[in-house]
Image: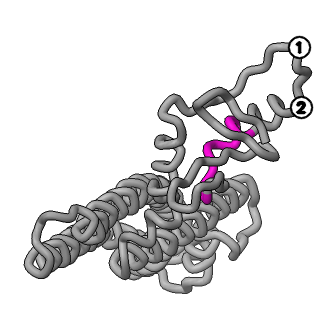
Amino acid sequence: MLRLGGFSFIADGRYLVYTPEVDRLVELSRQPASRLLGLARDFEQADAKSLSPVAIDPSAGQTLQLLVQIPNLRERLAQGGMVGYLILGLAAFAYALSGYRFVELAMAGKRMRRQLQSSELRLDNPLGRVLARLEQSTMNDEEALYLTVEEALTGEQAKLGRALAFLKLVAAIAPMLGLLGTVTGMIETFQAIALHGSGDPKLMSGGISEALVTTVAGLVAAIPVLLLHSLLTSKSQTLGSLLEAHAAAALAQRLEHRHAATAAERPTQNREA
């Protein structure tokens, strides 16, 4: 064990504090940051004639003992209670769904660009399926062809925008769940005040922590989900516009060929008459 003046005690690269109740040095249950522990280990191994940096506690252990009372991330999340865990679960599902939809839209865009470069219809992309639906149609009426293309476009655009409404719903619900946690936390705080009075702040800390943690969790969940929803919506609309433009071009080309064939048949019918 090393004693750093009247400030700190170090043993095996970890900090100790003096406990008057048992009249002995005990190891802190929660140590400082790993960078400071690294300095302590290096200081123990340093040559006595050389200089080496080390962190000390000027309050003779009081500041180090306060570290035990600071909750870590897991404890901070646990302070949110059931509402906090519900927000985190909803946010995790929304993040996973956003990642899946992003990959799906990226693959759809790549396959659509591959379809534009190929003369063969491919059914692994929205554009190929719409063009195949138009190609398979045997109707020659303009309105019927238009309705066929519109129906195919509606179905493919619905697939491109799948799950976006749910992400928007999560972005709206998460802050409301945070507000719910705030209200339940304040109710718990007032109950503690009614039972034990306001003399001991520790009795009220649980409810206040739940109120604050759930509020933060709701905002942390809603803001990224809202940004992801905007990104995916923009990407989906871009692919939908591309799909609609090329489908309209294919429909116009087919109608033009039909009009050209009809115009070529008229002179032949006139000569026969």
Q: Which residues are magenta?
A: 29-37
The amino acid marked with disc number 2 is Gln
Q: Are marks 2 and 1 in contact (CB under 8 Å)?
A: no
Q: Is residue 213 above or below residue 6?
A: below
Instruction: Locate the N terminus by quadrant.
Output: top right
Instruction: Identify the residue at horizontal 75%, vertical 58% (top origin).
Output: 118
Q: Is disc 1 placed on a helix, strand or loop?
A: loop
Q: Which residue is mark 1?
A: 49
Q: Residues within 10 Å of mark 1 (few under 14, many from 20)?
A: few
Viewer-proximal residue among 145 and 31? 31
Query: Which residue is denoted by mark 2 in the rendering?
Result: 45
Circle 2 — which element? helix
Q: Residue at x 55, y 33 (%)?
A: 57
Give the amino acid at mark 1.
Lys
| Vertical position of residue 253 compared to residue 156: above or below | above
Nearer-the-camera pick, 124 or 191 = 191
